[in-house]
Amino acid sequence: MIDDDFRRPDWKGWLLNRFVLVPLTLVVIALGWNAFVMTHNHGIVAGRVLDASGAPVEGADVQLWVFNFATFSVKASTTTKPDGTFQFDNNPSHNIQVSAEKPGVGRSARISVRLYFQSEDFYLKEPLRLTNGA
Amino acid sequence: MKRYPRWPIHLALLAVSFVMLVPFYWVLKTSVSGENIFSYPPSIIPQNPIPYYYVDVWYAIPFARFFFNSVVVSAMTVVANVVLNAMAGYALTRHFHGKTLVMMLFLSCMMIPFQATIIPAYLITAKLNLLDTYLGLALPMFSTIICIFVFKASFDAVPRSLIDAAKIDGLSEWKIIWKVMMPLAKSAMATNVILSFIWSWNNFMWPLISTRSPTMQTLPLGLARFLSYQEDTTGALYAFCIMVLAPGLLLFLLAQKEFVQGLTSGATKG
Amino acid sequence: MTVAISEPAVTRRAGFMGRKSTRQAVLIWAFLAPSLLIFLLYRILPLGWNVLLSFEAWSPMKPAVFVGWDNYEEMLFDDPVFWQALWNTLFIIGSAPIGIVIALGLALLVNADIKGRDTYRTIIFLSYPLMTVAVAIIWRWMFDERVGLINYIARVWHLVETPIPFLNSFTWALPSVIAANIWQMLGFYMIIILTGLQNIPGTLYEAAEIDGAKPIHRFFRITLPLLRPSIFLCFVIGMLNSVTSFDLVYVMTGGGPGRATEILVTYIYKLGFTQTRFDYAAAVTVVFFILLLVVTWTANRLSGGDAGAVERG
């Protein structure tokens, strides 16, 4: 033990000491994660709405539900553009649901979206499909 | 020793290891399981594993705040412990009037468990106006007898010739302590740091008694409170458990040797 | 002796022997002072204050009134909860040997000459540094009536037909808490016994083997007696730990069902901080402390009297 102390006085020895290396790695990871979060937390939730045959639906009502204590409640709504896409800009939560509806075309199921951090920018992979004329 | 078959020993130890590790696995499995955790039969492998309960926990309770509180209190405790215990340990290596009395005092304090002092400790802390403060949380744990004796043993092990040589060279008392004894007590310091950190980090009863406001609570308190908040069907509570256990486990795996060494040497010294 | 060797060299420089030794004494006491202060403030003083409080009737608003043995009378004659808590505490103390015996077996196994013994040792010790609150939550889940692992295994192996409500039954609640405690402490006991085992000189075994002693004899005549100090230490620490396992009881059962898992420590807490009866709680604390002393002293006597002796100087 005493020999160890006398043999490694240089900075390399210090760095490789597990008590320094592990916390240092953790700090680096934490900083990296924080940087990632800060550049990706605009609260964007975007996706597409298709009807039962797969064609994009324009002007469908899309609603954003946010989890509040015990239930979900509608926080924002928007309408789809001509190509069927929609985008919310200020999602504040990490646990949300999205649903779409167009009278005459149908309504979609409420899709649950879980995020890794609040206001994570998220692009829905699966489009919302409207079924059964409402 | 005589030759005997090894495999029964391995079998027995494997069985025991299994019993020791299964609770960890079971809680880990529950914390990532994506289904209702109260469905029977419970699944051995998590169905639909999702990591989102960890996110839930992070936002549902002020995890960062609790973590910060725990870190601050533990840091204060560790620093104070090392300083106070090293000083006391050094003092006990010298001969002086009343040394026996002091030793008896210390040893008898070992027999007084913290739980036998909670009521007056609370009253004293209240009188000092330290309730609900970091100092009040950390103060009772600023010094521990086991660690004093660990330091004492470490200082006792310094060869007398080294000290004599230093004295002949004209070093003052302080310089002797700083330049000769402390470097040789590195392992005692490491042990002290580890032990006092773990005890402070895991401490539940004292923070329960001495804090009032939710912003001053430490991690164990937050965990116990969470138990009553969210009795729902998700693994969020168990995700919280894992998050809370991770630092302790990590520290233990990093510093096993010091940990074990400190416990055995401190314990066997009475 | 060594002091005499170095003193002359130093006094030549300092001049007056008196001044130097006073300076040293001041230094030593200055070094001791902070730790002494902490212990005085948070161990000795509270103990005395407890004794004082137990003989008074005191509520934070009103001044204290000396009432003699009233609190103790109430405790011993009018308080069934106290007796239940006392019984539970004694039960826990009585079950400490179970953990020690298991740990003894484990230590013997781990001490054998096998590959990977360090890994086994780490795995078994893993449970000790964990936060007891988390351990309590884990075991609460394991003992859960509907989906706990224990019940699941019991049903899969057809040991029982209906699940056992471990933490809700009067007979199983306390043993469940004790089981969780043993799980956590096993590694700690094992480490202490292991250290004791490794301190037994191998030559003793060799000599016994040469004399024709069978392994069983070697165990009972050499190992066990020389392990007495370690076992005593395990018992004292284990008893202290389990009897003060506030965290486990509070989180696993809260003292319930009814008062089935109420131990003296949780009762003291409830008296002091839920009912704000500081004076009565102090009386119960005094009894609790006396119990600890009695048990430790008995264990000391039973294990040979010299175990855990104070290292003077």
Image: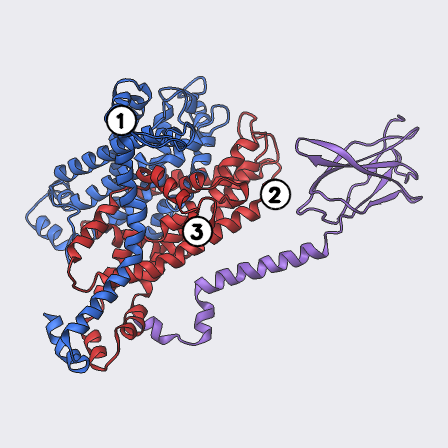
Chain colours: A purple, B red, C blue
Q: Which mark is residue A61?
A: none
| Residue B154 visible to an observer of this rendering | no
Q: Position of residue C117 (x, y in %)?
A: 32, 51
Label 2 near label 1: C-beta < 8 Å?
no
Residue B270 placement, left or right of B186: left
Q: Is mark 3 on a helix, strand or loop?
A: helix
Q: Where is residue C115 in the image (x, y as percent from the top left)?
A: 32, 52
Earlier sequence position, callout 3 versus callout 2: 2
Q: What residue type is labelled 1?
A: Val
Q: Which amino acid does label 3 sit on?
A: Leu
Residue, disc 1:
C67
Q: Which amino acid does label 2 sit on?
A: Pro
Residue, disc 2:
B51
The residue depicted at 52 percent of the width and 63 percent of the height is A24
Q: Nearer the viewer, residue B193 or C288?
A: C288
Marks 3 and 2 sit apart, C-alpha to C-alpha, by 36 Å
Residue, disc 3:
B135
Q: Position of residue B78 (x, y in %)?
A: 40, 56
Parent chain of label 1: C
Marks 1 and 3 sit apart, C-alpha to C-alpha, by 35 Å
